Image (spheres, rainbow, N blue to C red):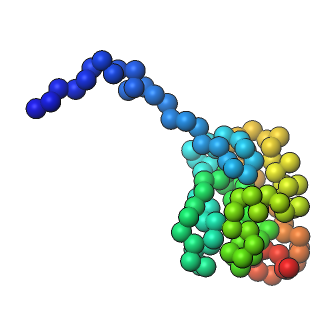
C-alpha cells in the first residue's frame, strides 16, 4: 500500500480559479452559474459555455432558438448584437451576485420566445 505524500500539503488548500462570464466579464458566483448551449439542444447543440444566470436569461429573452442556431451560435456573434451590447454595458456595473429578471425583448408584445427578424 502506497503512502500519501505529506510534503504536498499546500495543494490541499488550493482554491479553484473563479469562473468568469464571457458576456459580462464578471466573476460568476457558484449559485449564479448557468450552462448555455451555443446551439440550442432543440436544434442539435451539445457544446455549452458557463454564463451568469442573468446573462443567460437575457440571451433567451432577445433571441429565438432558430436565431441562436443560425446566426448567434458563438459568444462573439451574440456580443455583436446592439441589444446585447446595451445589456452588457448595464450589467457590468452590477456586483457579481446581482440577480434580475430578463428585460423584455425588442418586440414587446410579440408572443413566443425572442424577437422576430
Give the residue displayed 73% in from the left and 51% down from the top.
23
The residue located at (89%, 75%) in the rendering is 107
Quarter of the figure with the C terminus = bottom right
Q: Is residue 58 visible?
A: no
Which residue is the extreme one toward the top? Answer: 7
Among the 4 quarters of the image, the one containing residue 9: top left
Above or below residue 16? Residue 48 is below
Q: Could you tell whether 32 is left or right of 1 in the image? A: right
Task: Please report the residue visible at 61 percent of the width from the left and 79 percent of the height from the top.
Answer: 43
Q: Residue furthest left?
A: 1
Question: In this view of the protein, which residue sits in the foreground, 25 or 74?
Answer: 74
Q: Position of residue 96 (x, y in %)?
A: 70, 40
Q: Quadrant of residue 47?
A: bottom right
In the displayed structure, does residue 26 sit left or right of residue 17? Answer: right
The residue at 69%/68% (across/down) is: 73
Compared to 74, does 22 lie above or below? above
Quadrant for the N terminus, please. Answer: top left
Q: Quadrant of residue 92?
A: top right
Taking the image as shown, residue 4 lies to the left or right of residue 40, namely left
Asked whether residue 83 is in view, the answer is yes
Count of numbered badges drawn on the protein: 0
Image position, residue 77 (x, y; %): 76, 63
In the image, is residue 63 above or below residue 22?
Answer: below
Is 10 displayed left or right of 114 in the figure?
left
Q: Nearer the viewer, residue 57 or 18?
A: 18
* Residue 106 in picture, x, y percent from top left: 89, 70
Amino acid at each position: 500500500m502506497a503512502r500519501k505524500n505529506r510534503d504536498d500539503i499546500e495543494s490541499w488548500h488550493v482554491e479553484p480559479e473563479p469562473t468568469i462570464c464571457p458576456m459580462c466579464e464578471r466573476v460568476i458566483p457558484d449559485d449564479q452559474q448557468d450552462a448555455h448551449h451555443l446551439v440550442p439542444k432543440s436544434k442539435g447543440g451539445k457544446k455549452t459555455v458557463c454564463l451568469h444566470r442573468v446573462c443567460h436569461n437575457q440571451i433567451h429573452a432577445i433571441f429565438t432558438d432558430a436565431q441562436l442556431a443560425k446566426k448567434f451560435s458563438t459568444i462573439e456573434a451574440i456580443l455583436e448584437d446592439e441589444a446585447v451590447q446595451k445589456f452588457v454595458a448595464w450589467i457590468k456595473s452590477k456586483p457579481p451576485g446581482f440577480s434580475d429578471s430578463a428585460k423584455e425583448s425588442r418586440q414587446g408584445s410579440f408572443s413566443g420566445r425572442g424577437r422576430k427578424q
